[in-house]
Amino acid sequence: MAIEKLPSGTRGARLPPRLLMRLMMPVMTWFHRRAHDRFGGQELLYLHTVGAKSGQARTHPVARFDDGGGGWIVVASAGGAASHPAWYHNLVAHPDQVQAEVGGTNRRATVRQLDGAEREAAWAVVVARAPRFEAYRTNTDRELPVLRITPVD
């Protein structure tokens, strides 16, 4: 169940420094949970991964889009940055050690990177529900990875 890592870009949106994000993430997650796992009108999924380099457990709130089959579509957009978000690197390194938490229920999950017509169909759903994702795509020259997260019973 390997995931082929897509190449980074050469241009894109600027992201806050990693140290700032690392300090702010627990506070932001607390607010997200108090808002019933929503942020900016978007439903969130808490992606539990294993660090690509550190091997330590990591939790990342990401926008989720129901796929109609009990799973979710997520996009490794990083706001249109030139590089992929850390959680994408973690998924590529350890695709068999992923859990998805929705509504307070944490379940083991499989991850599949979409391509071709399947990716385009999922992308159309994403931008229909959250038009700002189209701006993320135009901010960068990298292909934004679109992934399907499926819970395992």
Image (tube, rainbow, N blue to C red):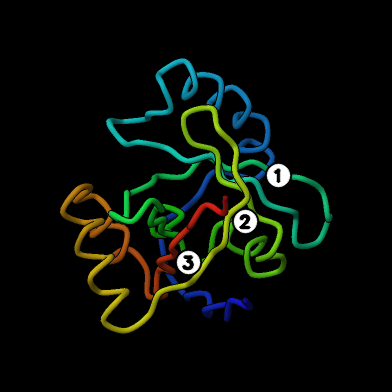
Q: Which mark is residue 82?
A: 3
Residue 137 picture quarter:
bottom left
Identify which residue is drawn at 42% across, 37% down.
Answer: 44
Q: Position of residue 124 (x, y in %)?
A: 19, 64
Relative horizontal placement of residue 37, taking residue 19 as reference (left or right): left
Q: Position of residue 102 (x, y in %)?
A: 48, 36
Q: Kindly identify the amino acid type of the residue bearing the numbered disc 2.
A: Ala
User: Do callouts 1 and 2 mark residues in contact (Cβ within 8 Å)?
Assistant: yes
Q: Which mark is residue 86?
A: 2
Q: Which residue is mark 1?
A: 58
Q: Kindly identify the amino acid type of the residue bearing the numbered disc 1.
A: Arg
Tag 3 secondary structure:
loop
Q: Is residue 83 above or below residue 70?
A: below
Identify which residue is drawn at 32% across, 49% down.
Answer: 66
Q: Is residue 24 above or below residue 31?
A: below
Closer mark to the observer between disc 3 and disc 1? 1
Identify which residue is drawn at 54% across, 64% down.
Answer: 111
Q: Kindly identify the amino acid type of the residue bearing the numbered disc 3.
A: Ala
Mark 2, other Cα within 10 Å: few <14 / some 14–19 / many ≥20 = some
Tag 1 secondary structure:
strand
Q: Quadrant of the N terminus?
A: bottom right
User: Do callouts 2 and 3 mark residues in contact (Cβ within 8 Å)?
Assistant: no
Q: Earlier in the sequence, mark 3 or mark 1?
A: 1
